[in-house]
Image (spheres, rainbow, N blue to C red):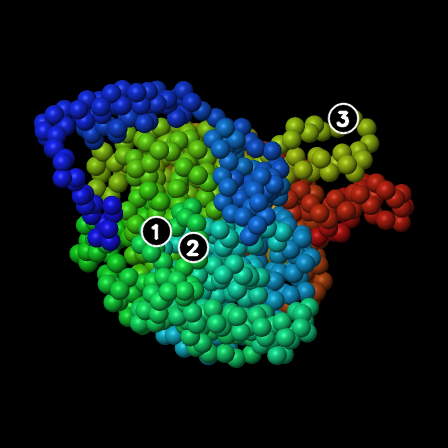
Amino acid sequence: MKLKDEKYHSHPDKGFKPVPATLLVIVLCGFSFYLGGIFSTEKNQLEGNIVQDVSRQVPSPKEAAVNPLQIKSVSFQECSIDYQDYTPCTDPRRWRKYGYHRLTFLERHCPPPFERKECLIPPPNGYKPPIRWPKSRDQCWYKNVPYDWINKQKSNQNWLRKEGDKFMFPGGGTMFPRGVSAYVDLMQDLIPEMSDGTIRTAIDTGCGVASWGGDLLDRGILTVSLAPRDNHEAQVQFALERGIPAILGVISTQRLPFPSNSFDMAHCSRCLIPWTEFGGIYLLEVHRILRPGGFWVLSGPPVNYENRWRGWNTTIEEQKSDYEKLTDLLTSMCFKLYAKKDDIAVWQKASDNTCYEKLAEPDVYPAKCDDSVEPDSAWYTPLRSCVVVPNSKYKKTALESLPKWPQRLVAAPERISDIPGGSASTLKHDDSKWKVRAKHYKKLLPALGTDKIRNVMDMNTVYGGFATSLIEDPLWVMNVVSSYAANTLPVVYDRGLIGTYHDWCEAFSTYPRTYDLLHLDGLFTAESHRCDMKYMLLEMDRILRPSGYVLIRESSYFVDAIATIAKGMKWGCRKEDTEYGVEKEKILVCQKKLWFFFSGTTMSGKGSSSFGEIEETLDIVEKKFMRLRNFDILDQYPPEDHHYKRFLNSLLSSSGLKSQTLTRNSFSKAIEKEMYILEESLPDWIFVRAYSSRFDLMRVAISGLENTPYRYGLFFFDIFIPHDYPYQPPQIFYNSYGHSFTNSKLRQDGRVSLPILEDQNWVPHRFTILDILEYIQHSVLNFVPKLEYSVLKELMSDEKERKQEFNQTCEAMLSILEKPPRGFGDFVAGYCGHHYDDKVRSILKDDDQRDRKDDFSLEKPIDLFKLVW
């Protein structure tokens, strides 16, 4: 019998004779040996690819260094385009298999192993790198989340609206038509703790497009936006595309994957959850995850029913009854009304356990939960119609007892004592360790800490140390604790961070392409005995954005095998040492490549092309373009039309080089550094190609910026880097195609006039190649270039000058289309298809369907360019 002290006590009969201990041990050992022989024939989990069995015990570091796990090379097919938004455990294709009672079909129902997909999830056609934070909070690319239903249904409520090729998020909502900021301002007036660092973590149930959580970020509050995959189409995907924390989930029959007493505040804005039905079981779950002294905020029915009932398709009597039921239920759970104004009502959970004493009385509902289920058990744990009473031994988990943010982050939480080996000194040591690691990571991955990385997941955190080390960077971290590991997630929340429980043998509760960086520390060492490495990596690929990064810190035993599978998923990986350079552990730095699904459509043959045939051609061309990287080193010689290759001998002579062949060994570390900076940090619409046989030569394509006469135009430059760079500036030649511009910095003869490249202005180590290219894009390719103040008035007052510059850009683009620079043919065609896609299609379709002589003719391409521009 198991008693409350969790010790087992036996009550032997009086006539019982004890068995000799020695005999008992022998019998048990023999039985264990027999069972071990039966169950030791488990098959390999990588379907024959693994040469050595992953399920074996991981060898010692010394053995691992000698005999790392080896697998055969593997490649994965691309899933069809129908799977572009595939969420394996919340797949609408499987809803009919599950009941509709309490919306159980919306909960997690993962496919069995024989139904798992072993293919790569494709992005939507036309997918672009997401807009960067903080601009992303207000807009995202339509083709990245191409869902029209939610736009049509919710645009009148200002959730979002489609403008051109973007979705805009004006910050509206069903209950905040004046905007989310005004709504939160009112809420903050009712709850002063929102503005002084007391409230740090929140959960938004039924989050819409997460505008509430997005607004709270500026107020220092980190919100988990929660919504199911339902007819609203990708609420969570919109949230994550905007750079706002979110996760798929629904309060139905199972607990949410969060520990008890974790969130400082919970919010429901007309979230349509029937709080008083089924004995208030959904509200009991909110009570469980809300910490003592935490706040529950409700706006919408039945709050303010006296003034709102007419718009709710009900009667005032029904709404009054619902409100009274709700208040009675909240009171029975030890909530009290904290504040109420207009459409917002706020209740506060009891800070101590005095109120819960009444739950011990017979016939009280809801009753106090017994001790048979842990309060923090939340992975496939059924909801229970009872109150989870906070553990009375914790005196400092109540909201008012916690240090205010940001002091809360570094204070040792009281609940750390529940973790084996957990203590204040352990936490301090862990934080120190992660500071060192984060510094090393940023050397290996310079994008970390910049606006290139916003959504981050720590796949197997302990205390949230990785997230803590990055707290000053423009990103947020979803801290994941394995459902099979020590329960450290309460500590993560007590520190003011967010996270979730998860089992990595299954798919994560999110949409594809939602994280910029995945980090793991020994995950395969910990889980390889349970989970198939191949499926874990395929799941990582599903949730990682194209061009996103992965930092894998792992035992040397697994690293090579992981790299082999990653290569089959179109990842580029490199193996690096840890910050201490130990052999038993390595770091894989990987990046996912952007690719598109091809359906095998062939282009039409000779003869006149219909609109449909042209449209197919445009699709294929654009897909090729989207596969191109901003920076690439081509394994070939520079093209013959490269300006500086034609004058190679004179340049080599003037720069003092004796040999015409430059090898990698003859380049300084400065040049290698330049290559690395270009690979990691090139902005959108600057494309650089270097050549493996000649690292001193480059070809660059720069796109004109919007709101200038050069918008969407392509400008090609050839670059020569002298051997004594950076003590001498690089030389740059503009491929003008014989066209002249009013812009005095771009000459018809190819000369580029840049003050920073003049000998008297050049400062070694001050400017990089990237700086020069960005200067050209932002200052030279501008109608009124910086530093040209003498012509400012003239240009601003004369619109003819602007139109002339625009016409020259159009003419130059036609020349480039007719004869693109060598090595950039696919790029030029794809670039035009990408930017002019919708407009060109409509023009071509109109021309195909109507023979109108008075319209422009396709025989006059300059008219087409001017029209689509």
Res. 99 visible in picture = yes
Q: Secondary structure at mark 3?
A: loop
Q: Judge by depth and name the residue closer to the eye, 565 or 506.
A: 506
Q: Is residue 176 above or below residue 819?
A: below
Q: Which residue is mark 2?
A: 384
Of mark 1 and mark 3, the one earlier in the sequence is 1
Q: Which residue is mark 3?
A: 605
Q: Secondary structure at mark 1?
A: loop
Res. 637 visible in picture = no
Rendering coords of residue 587 (x, y %): 31, 38
For this view, does 165 lie left or right of residue 349? right
Residue 459, picture quadrant:
top left
Q: Are marks 2 and 1 in contact (CB under 8 Å)?
A: yes
Q: Residue at 40%, 20% (x, y): give it.
A: 48
Q: Judge by depth and name the residue closer to the eye, 654 or 436.
A: 436
Rendering coords of residue 833 (x, y %): 67, 42
What distance separates the C-alpha of mark 1 from that of mark 3?
Answer: 69 Å
For residue 373, the mark is 1
What distance separates the C-alpha of mark 2 from that of mark 1?
Answer: 10 Å
Which amino acid, mark 3? Answer: Gly
Which amino acid, mark 1? Answer: Val
